[in-house]
Amino acid sequence: MREELNTSHTQLNVLLSDKVELQNLINKHGQERDRLLEDLNQSFKEKNEKEIRLEEALTELSSTQDQLFTVKEELVKNRIEAEKLRESLHRARSELDNLDKNISQIKTERDLMSESQSKAMYLEEKVEELELLNRSLSRRLSV
């Protein structure tokens, strides 16, 4: 019986040793599991932060694209306006050229009229001289 008791005691010690070893393995695996869960949680946090930054970047990009589109629209409007202004400037220059021609023509006509008036005054003087001469001759002939 003693031998059985020793054997049972040895088996009990082996079982207790196995239990302690199993408990150590369970604790070790638990710690490993906790570390892996912590790493996984950290990875999820980093992923969420990256997603948030990506969303912010996409929002900023969308805003920038909207601004770019608005600037492009303004640029097109400005180009159209610039073309209209160029056409207006061309018309104004043409009108100015026509006005210069008209002014030149009016000056020429004025000079011609002035010359004609001078000639008319000269001719009037000559007519008056001729009339005086005619009267004078008429008196002489009548006498």
Image (spheres, grey):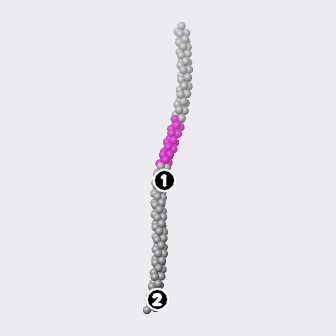
* Residue pointed to by mark 2: 6
Q: Is residue 104 visible?
A: yes
Q: Is residue 141 found left or right of 44 in the rendered image? A: right
Residue 11, x across and y down, in percent? 46, 86
- The residue at 51%/44% (across/down) is 86
At which x and y percent is residue 84?
48, 45
What residue is drawn where x is 48% and y is 75%? 28
Q: CA distance from mark 2 to mark 1?
A: 90 Å
**Please, is residue 89 above or below residue 35 in the view?**
above
Q: Is residue 29 visible?
A: no
For residue 116, above or below residue 76: above
Instruction: Tell me the kind of residue under disc 1.
Output: Leu
The magenta region covers: 76-99
Residue 115 appears in which quarter of the rendering? top right
Quadrant where the N terminus sits is bottom left
- SS of the residue at dot 1? helix
Q: Which residue is mark 1?
A: 68
Question: Residue at left 49%, top 49%?
Answer: 75
Q: At label 2, which amino acid type do we have?
A: Asn
